[in-house]
Image (cartoon, helix red, strand yellow):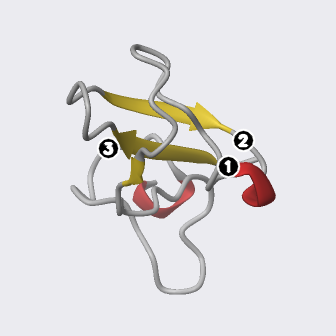
Amino acid sequence: MPTYDYNCPKCGADFSAFVTMSQRDRVPCPHCDHPDVRQKITTLHRSGSARGGGSCATGGCSGCTGCR
């Protein structure tokens, strides 16, 4: 299941939820229980091997296969 980031227009809370894709549009705010939260657009973070043209942002962390 993916993690989605949300913002509540009622109380202004930013939060993340670990839900299925079919549930992502039905997540209430955990702070005020408002049912109409907005999903935020975030970047995808890649981990593991950098094969296929990708690498980490700094290029020198030595924490992934692409930096070694």
Measuring from the top left, give residue 66's x and y in whole percent: 48, 63
Q: Residues within 10 Å of mark 2 (few under 14, many from 20)?
A: some
Q: Position of residue 45 (x, y in %)?
A: 46, 56
First along the sequence among labels 3 and 1: 1
- N-term mark: 2 or 1: 1
**Residues at badges 3 and 2 in contact (C-beta under 8 Å)?**
no
Residue type for callout 2: Val
**Answer yes or no: do the residues labelled 2 and 1 have beta carbons within 8 Å?**
yes
Q: Amino acid at mark 1?
A: Pro
Q: Amino acid at mark 3?
A: Cys
Mark 3 element type: loop
User: What residue lies at 23% left-to-right and 24% top-to-bottom?
Assistant: 11
User: Which one is in front in this view, the residue at disc 2 or the one at disc 1?
Assistant: 2
Residue at 51%, 59% in the rendered image:
46
Q: Nearer the viewer, residue 4 or 49?
A: 4
Helix, strand or loop under label 1:
loop
Q: Is residue 5 shown above or below 18?
A: below
Query: Residue 24 or 66: which is nearer the viewer?
Result: 24
In the image, taking residue 38 as reference, residue 30 lies left or right, namely right
Residue 40 visible somewhere in the drawing: yes
Residue receiving disc 3: 61
Residue 1 horizontal/vertical position (percent): 78, 46
- Is 8 above or below relative to 54? above
Q: Circle 1 is placed at which residue position? A: 2
How many marks do you count on the picture?
3
The image's mark for residue 19 is 2
